[in-house]
Each structure stands twice: as structure tokens, then as C-alpha cells.
Image (cartoon, rainbow, N blue to C red):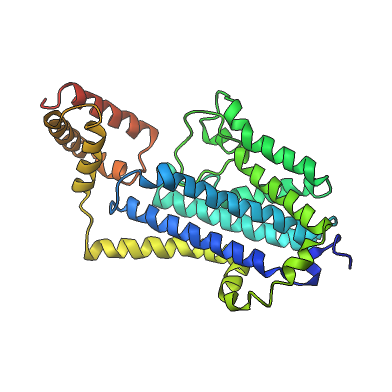
Amino acid sequence: MPESISPSARGRVEIIDIARAVAIAAMATYHFTWDLEHFSYVAEGLTAQGGWRIFARCIASSFLFLVGFSLVLAHGREIRWRKFLVRLAQIVAGAIAVTVATLFVTPNSFVFFGILQHIALASVLGLAFLRLPAVLTALCGVAVVAAPSFVTLPGFDSRWLAWIGWFSEKMPLSNDLVPIFPFFGAVLIGIAAGRIAVDRGWIAMMRGWNDRLAGLWPLGVAGRHALIIYLLHQPLLYGLVALFTIVAPPDRDAIFRGDCNRACLATRDAAFCTDYCDCAETRLKSKNLFDSLMKNDAGPDEMSRIREITAACSFDPKG
């Protein structure tokens, strides 16, 4: 069978499986840190800002690039429908499981369109690009990545539309939001890279590295079972951290005060910040909002009440 028809027919490309395993390991690292934040062992908001935020986006982009590249390897210029539909059904089932699980654990920030939902839809959309010239596909990918930087649309701050793209400055709260714009761009760039690799005969060269990579076989195995590892790793990590809270409960008061003081001291003096943080903590606890805030799972109404409390404390911290 010609490689242009089905590049994967001649055997697996071990480096792709290894790359997928590395991405899974990176995601597990991020999720473990998120779990520590959720249970208040590290600063609230840590994983949503700075280097951790960039790290999360790089992980998602690497997964989606590999989705595009693998789509070319699996189907070439001829879609193998049975294999495609079986794999799609597995991903959709996993996506539904994640949504249901997070709806129970973090109802205000559940995953309504995370990485698995994106992979499922991107796998379908990506089929339309398999036969296009690689350069055109890559340009489409760049356009998809760039679009949110130039387009702002009202109404995209709801869960009904937010899955399409980051077209609003205020996106709905979710523990894993991976919208089509910009992330489908990574899939398209992966398809373009796969198309170039196939057309130029690089796949055979990459497959030739398999023997030299034999020592990394555990990563290869993990990469071939990435979906099941993805589905299992976070419940296991979350459960372990939850169990640890029984042995060594986190000091949420200390975490809150540390975060509050750092933010406050950027604009006010230490005496004011002490009173302000005392006021905010006391009032948040009295209104049963403290736990939701520390878990980063406060709903829109709760966030409005939290902002009202912090605003009131900023005007009258001793009131």
C-alpha cells in the first residue's frame, strides 16, 4: 500500500508515541499542581497565571498538533472510516465522562469544552484538510490562532458560544476550556506538518529511529494508550491529594492572607492591608463564600457577592 494512502500501514512511528507520552506527563504535572491549588496547598490562582498559564497552553497545543499529525498518519489521503469512527466514539465517551465528573466535583467550573471535546470535533473538522496543500492548511492554522487577537464579538462570554473561540474579554469559568479559536490552529499546523513529512518521505526516516528509541519503550506504550491514561491520571492524583488533606490539612487561612496581602500591598500600606484582609476573610466566611473562593469554583452570582464584600472592605476595613 503506498505511503501516501496510509502512512501508518507500515508500522508505528515510535517518536510520535513518545512525544504523546511526554505531553501526558506534562499534563499530569500541571494537573497535580492544580490539585494542590484546589485543596489550598499552594497560592490560589497559581495555575491560571504567568508561567503556569503558558505551560498549560503549550501542553494543549502540543496534544492538538499531534492530533493533526496523527490524522495524516492514520488516513493519508484516504479516510479509513471504521477506524476513524471507533476512535471518535472512544474520545466522545471520554469527553462526556469528564464533563459529568467535573459537573459533580466543581459544578460552577465544570468542563463543558475541554481538550477531549476539542479533539473530537477537531478530528472531524480536520478531515476536510487532509487533501489540501500543506501550505494552505498551515496558513489556515495561523489564521485560526491569530483570530482571537483581532476579533472581539459580544455574546461569546456564555457557555453556549465560548467553545467557538476566545472572542470575549470575559470567558465563562471552566477548569479546562479549549475553544476552536485559537486551538484548532494547532491541529491544522499538525496536519500541514504531517502532510509535508509524508510527501517528502520523512515518515520512513522517522520510523527508522524506532530501534534507537527502543530503550524508551515505556514511553512508547504510554503514548499508545494516551486516552486511558488521560482519563485515569487526574482522578488518581485528585484522590491522592484529597486523602492527604486528612493527614495534613492545608492552612487555607494562611494561603488566603498571603494572597490577599500580596495583592493589597501593591497599592496600600501594611496597616490598611491587615485590616482589609481581616475584614474580607471574616465576611466571606460569614456568607459561606470562603470555600468556593479558595477552590476557585465560585459561580457568577457568588463572584458578584465576593466582589461586593471586598469592595466594602476596601472602603471600610474596620466596619
Left or right side of 292 for 300: right
Residue 282 is situated, as x and y percent measured from the top left of the image, at 16, 37
Horizontal placement of 219 versus 195: left or right?
Answer: left
- Report the number of numbered marks: 0
Compare residues 139 and 241 and report the one nearer the observer. Answer: 139
Residue 164 found in image quarter: top right
Q: Nearer the viewer, residue 171 or 223?
A: 223
Location of residue 145 in the rendering, given as x and y in whole percent from the top left corner: 63, 38
Q: What residue is drawn where x is 58% and y is 24%?
A: 153
Which quadrant is the C terminus positioned in? top left
Quadrant of the frame with the N terminus? bottom right
Q: Is residue 200 visible?
A: yes
Tell me: 185 left or right of 277: right
Q: Residue at x 24, y 29 (%)?
A: 310
Q: Does the rendering let one see residue 76? A: no
Q: Residue 107: x percent and y percent?
A: 41, 45
On screen, residue 81 versus residue 270, left or right, reads right
